[in-house]
């Protein structure tokens, strides 16, 4: 298990309001409107890349790392008026788009210390990933998830092995595009298992 992942599991999880405030801040400050996939992946990146002690246990799922508790928290945040969702039509179906709700500032104010403590990390994740499409976020988060899986087993792999592993899970993604994305992540120091 990687030092970062071990450290993450030993952290005390954020309070309920802190967690909701971080979700609200991500929604409000994202450079483009986040949907469920975008928000899920930003929370994954905050936990895995930036060691923010979010209480989620992400598992690999249809669109990359997923935890159903995020959806529960989104519903709770919406019921409190921290965020609001709009059902939107896309060429492939329907999805949700989130924006700050009428009580967003109140929720953020109640957890100002947590939001302030993690402000730089939130800004960093939004600047790196906030403008990416859902399919890009699916690929990047799956790359990082599988990379950390190799690391947790004490394995070092070549970039091509990581790309093939992601392609095996996500056959609709091109191996060349996966490799290119993995190369960029490696150059930015975001992969831990790649030689």
Image: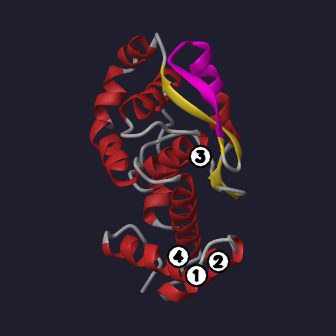
Total count of labels? 4
From what the image shows, is residue 108 above or below residue 67?
Answer: above
Q: Which residue is mark 2?
A: 167
Q: Which residue is mark 1?
A: 175
Q: Is residue 167 left or right of residue 140?
A: right
Mark 2 / mark 3, whichever is N-terminal: 3
Within-10-Å neighbours for mark 1: few <14, some 14–19, many 20+ = some
Q: Residue 85 lies in magenta, yes or no?
A: yes
Within-10-Å neighbours for mark 3: few <14, some 14–19, many 20+ = many
Q: Residue at x 54, y 13 (%)?
A: 81
Q: Which residue is mark 4?
A: 178
Does residue 135 show up? yes
Does residue 157 show up? no
Work out how far the residue at label 1 is from the one at label 3, CA to CA, in angstroms. 22 Å
Pointers 1 and 4 in contact (C-beta within 8 Å):
yes
User: Looking at the image, which is closer to me, 95 or 64?
Assistant: 95
Q: Which residues are magenta?
A: 73-89
Q: Quadrant of residue 150?
A: bottom right
From what the image shows, is residue 158 above or below residue 12?
Answer: below
Q: Which mark is residue 9?
A: none
Work out how far the residue at label 3 is from the one at label 4, CA to CA, in angstroms. 18 Å
Mark 4 / mark 2, whichever is N-terminal: 2
Q: Secondary structure at mark 3?
A: helix
Pointers 4 and 2 in contact (C-beta within 8 Å):
yes
Quadrant where the C terminus is found in the figure: bottom left
Work out how far the residue at label 1 is from the one at label 4, CA to CA, in angstroms. 5 Å
Quadrant where the N terminus is found in the figure: bottom right
Residue 45, how many percent across, how many down?
46, 52
Pointers 1 and 2 in contact (C-beta within 8 Å):
yes
Mark 1 / mark 3, whichever is N-terminal: 3
């Amino acid at each position: 298990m990687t030092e970062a992942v071990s450290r993450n599991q030993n952290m005390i999880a954020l309070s309920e309001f802190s967690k909701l405030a971080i979700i609200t801040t991500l929604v409000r400050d994202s450079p483009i409107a986040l949907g469920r996939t975008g928000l899920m992946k930003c929370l994954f990146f905050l936990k895995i890349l930036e060691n923010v002690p979010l209480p989620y246990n992400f598992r690999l799922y249809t669109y990359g790392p997923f935890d159903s508790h995020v959806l529960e928290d989104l519903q709770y945040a919406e019921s409190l008026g921290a965020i609001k969702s709009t059902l939107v039509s896309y060429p492939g179906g329907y999805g949700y788009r989130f924006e700050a709700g009428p009580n967003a500032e109140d929720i953020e104010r109640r957890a100002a210390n947590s939001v302030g403590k993690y402000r730089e990390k939130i800004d960093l994740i939004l600047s790196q990933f906030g403008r990416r499409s859902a399919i890009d976020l699916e690929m990047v988060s799956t790359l990082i998830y599988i990379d950390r899986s190799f690391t947790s087993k004490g394995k070092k792999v070549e970039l091509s092995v990581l790309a093939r592993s992601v392609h095996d899970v996500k056959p609709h993604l091109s191996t060349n595009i996966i490799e290119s994305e993995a190369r960029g992540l490696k150059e930015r120091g975001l992969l831990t298992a790649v030689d």
